[in-house]
Amino acid sequence: MLATFARCLKQTTLEEIRGLQARATLGLRESRALQAVQHGLQRDVENLPESERAVPERALQASTVLRSLYSMRQELTALN
């Protein structure tokens, strides 16, 4: 299930980041923001080094969709 979730994650995350960029929420180039947010969503944000935590946390605060994806990922992980 996590593999299927990971495949769906990229497109949805990209669309959300484009929306956040349009509102100037993240302040990074799209490719760098996508990489940082995906990295944070595929792992627990709390377990990331402090230097890598800021962008995923800002994205989660700014986007209901990304918060939902992160919550779903945590639930799927708990089932395994």
Image (spheres, helix red, strand yellow):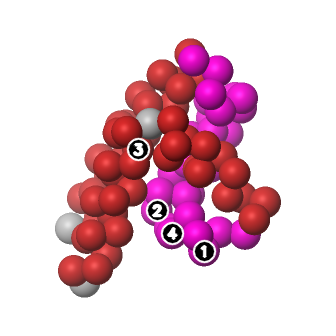
Q: CA distance from mark 4 to mark 3?
A: 13 Å
- Mark 1: amino acid: Asn
Which residue is label 2 attached to? Answer: 42
Badge 3 vs badge 1, beta-carbon distance below 8 Å = no
Which residue is label 1 attached to? Answer: 47
Which residue is label 4 attached to? Answer: 44
Q: Nearer the viewer, residue 71 or 5?
A: 71
Image spot of residue 47 (x, y percent): 60, 74
Which residues, given as a range, are shown in magenta? Answer: 23-49
Q: Residue furthest bottom?
A: 80
Q: Sequence-wise, which precedes: disc 3 or disc 2? A: 2
In the displayed structure, 65 sits above or below 75; it is above
> Please, what secondary structure does the residue beneath circle 4 have?
loop
In the displayed structure, 37 sits above or below 4; it is above
Which marked residue is nearer to the observer: mark 3 or mark 2? 3
Q: Residue furthest right?
A: 51
